[in-house]
């Protein structure tokens, strides 16, 4: 049984109260935070108040939602009205959101208990959570290693059982890569499946909210609560809503899973490759047919992404000028308007953001737009086409989530090395398809066993398909 199902049962059978459950998790947070630093904000008082409301409803004989009364966390780029929302950046250090994101509102309507906001790379740019202005988050499996990123706080919090579930955002892998590094489940739905209203934008044609939990069923339960069309987000899709947890049959008979040769090439570490092919065998045992396929434009994905994402970032971040919100200076602290912007943006943004804003502004500039951004969009079309062709032959595509296990803090000071961390995840964002990372075991790294994930890509809007495939794997192994 999933963690959410079990806790829910205890609540309705009055074996446990939401206040007790929430306190229990808050105690774990107190215990572990000095080591992990998974949170930027912890809202203990509000969480206990919300938990009490659920207990009152249960006492009054009212029925409650599956997620009601169960503690979870949001990445700190998702707005909660009246709460600090920093996106891991100094420029938004004291920014208080004036409204709830749609996902926040939907979670509150379900009665979920929000215990806090999790740490992340600044504006979700990164793969390690080291670029947060609020300290590094550590990997619960080894405190000398990163939890992955950019949703590293959410991953560490779920993996160490500080919360039952957490949300992250995934622009190029930021939910799936930390899920792989921390041994949990990470789901990035189809572009448009979940409203992004109230989420601090990074790269708008790629961003999507994702879900991090310990079990696949729990991810399905959370998805049901937050997915669906939203008038407040023009990119949200007119897709029919589903109760995803009802699609977990645990049966894969007759399903075809493609293994793309480009994802298991010579660059993949040998022990991860072995672990991955063990997982392929397990999928066979679950009744799936395994088919070798090719996604020929994969080799261009990283370069394409690192034109599109910084370009859109540079445009989205133009709003942080110190005038309306965030970091600001008083009259007298600057000479003129240019000096004001220079000082705000110069001291408010970290070095990775500055690097990307400069690159993005260059790629979008009038003389270079056609050569860079437009060309990248064309290649993006080819990458999407690869998937369209592949999905005529197979139902799902299975790959390693990451080419390595969690790396050491400080190990990837060269940004190009860090970018390679997302080599297997970014294609799903470029194509807009759903993808899930689920644990496939551990791999010995420098004498310790570290978790690693396998990734399933699905057809556009087939979240229930990949959830069921991952669920079947999880149930059998
Ligand atoms: N690591 C990638 C980047 O830095 C992906 C980040 C994300 O998905 N938010 O852009």
Image (tube, rainbow, N blue to C red):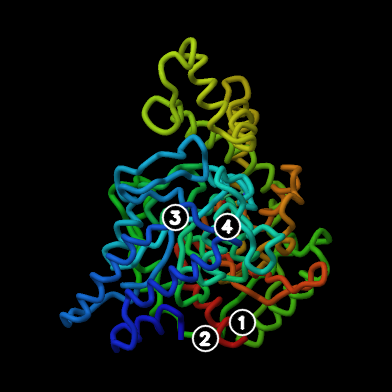
Is residue 59 positioned above or below 229 on the image? Answer: below
Q: Which residue is mark 1?
A: 288
Q: Nearer the viewer, residue 372 or 163?
A: 163
Q: Position of residue 380 (x, y in %)?
A: 60, 45
What secondary structure is found at the residue carrying circle 3? strand
What is the spatial separation of the Cα atoms under label 2 and label 3, in whole angstroms? 36 Å
Q: Earlier in the sequence, mark 3 or mark 4?
A: 3
Task: From the viewer's perspective, tell me whether residue 408 is left or right of residue 207.
Answer: right
For marks 4 and 2, give the one nearer the viewer: 4
Q: Position of residue 341 (x, y in %)?
A: 50, 20
Q: Is label 2 in contact with label 3 (beta carbons under 8 Å)? A: no
Q: Earlier in the sequence, mark 1 or mark 2?
A: 2
Q: Which residue is mark 4?
A: 152
What secondary structure is found at the residue carrying circle 1? loop
Q: Which residue is mark 3?
A: 117
Q: Earlier in the sequence, mark 4 or mark 2?
A: 4
CB of residue at label 1: within 8 Å of ligand 1? no
What is the spatial separation of the Cα atoms under label 1 and label 4, in whole angstroms? 32 Å
Q: Nearer the viewer, residue 432 or 165?
A: 165
Q: Nearer the viewer, residue 223 or 98?
A: 98
Sort mark 3 into few (<14), some (14-19) or many (20+) by Cα contacts within 10 Å.
many
Q: Earlier in the sequence, mark 2 or mark 3?
A: 3
Sort mark 2 into few (<14), some (14-19) or many (20+) by Cα contacts within 10 Å.
some
């Amino acid at each position: 049984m999933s963690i959410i199902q079990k806790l829910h049962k205890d609540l309705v059978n009055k074996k446990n109260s939401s206040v007790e459950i929430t306190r229990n998790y808050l105690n774990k947070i107190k215990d572990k935070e000095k080591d992990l630093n998974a949170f930027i904000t912890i809202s203990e008082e509000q969480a206990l108040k919300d938990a009490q409301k659920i207990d009152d409803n249960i006492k009054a004989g009212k029925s409650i939602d599956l997620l009601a009364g169960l503690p979870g966390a949001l990445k700190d780029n998702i707005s909660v009205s009246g709460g600090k929302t920093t996106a891991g950046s100094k420029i938004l250090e004291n920014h208080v959101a004036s409204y709830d994101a749609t996902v926040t509102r939907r979670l509150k309507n379900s009665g979920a208990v929000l215990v806090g906001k999790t740490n992340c790379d600044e504006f979700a740019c990164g793969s390690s959570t080291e670029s947060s202005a609020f300290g590094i988050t550590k990997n619960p499996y080894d405190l000398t290693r990163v939890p992955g990123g950019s949703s590293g706080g959410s991953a560490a919090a779920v993996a160490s059982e500080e919360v039952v579930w957490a949300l992250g955002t995934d622009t190029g892998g930021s939910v799936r890569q930390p899920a792989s590094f921390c041994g949990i489940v990470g789901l990035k739905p189809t572009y448009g499946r979940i409203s992004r209203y109230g989420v601090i934008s990074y790269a708008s044609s790629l961003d999507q909210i994702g879900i991090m939990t310990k079990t696949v069923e729990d991810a399905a339960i959370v998805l049901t609560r937050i997915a669906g069309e939203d008038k407040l987000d023009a990119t949200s899709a007119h897709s029919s809503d589903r109760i995803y947890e009802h699609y977990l049959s645990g049966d894969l008979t007759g399903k075809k899973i493609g293994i793309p040769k480009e994802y298991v090439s010579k660059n993949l570490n040998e022990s991860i490759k072995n672990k991955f092919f063990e997982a392929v065998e397990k999928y066979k045992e679950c009744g799936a047919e395994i088919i070798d396929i090719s996604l020929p434009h994969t080799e261009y994905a990283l370069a394409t992404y690192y034109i599109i994402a910084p370009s859109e970032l540079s445009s989205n971040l133009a709003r942080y000028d110190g005038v309306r919100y965030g970091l600001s200076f008083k009259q007298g602290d600057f000479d003129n308007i240019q000096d004001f912007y220079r000082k705000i943006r110069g001291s408010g943004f970290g070095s990775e953001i500055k690097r990307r804003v400069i690159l993005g502004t260059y790629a979008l500039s009038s003389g270079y737009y056609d050569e860079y951004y437009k060309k990248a969009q064309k290649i993006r079309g080819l990458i999407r086409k690869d998937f369209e062709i592949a999905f005529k032959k197979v139902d799902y595509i299975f790959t390693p989530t990451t080419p390595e296990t969690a790396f050491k803090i400080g190990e990837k000071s060269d940004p190009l090395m860090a970018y390679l961390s997302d080599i297997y995840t970014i294609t799903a964002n470029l194509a807009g398809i759903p993808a899930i990372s689920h644990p496939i075991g551990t791999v010995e790294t420098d004498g310790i066993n570290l978790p690693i994930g396998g990734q399933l890509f699905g057809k556009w809007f087939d979240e229930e398909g990949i959830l069921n495939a991952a669920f079947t794997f999880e149930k059998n192994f």
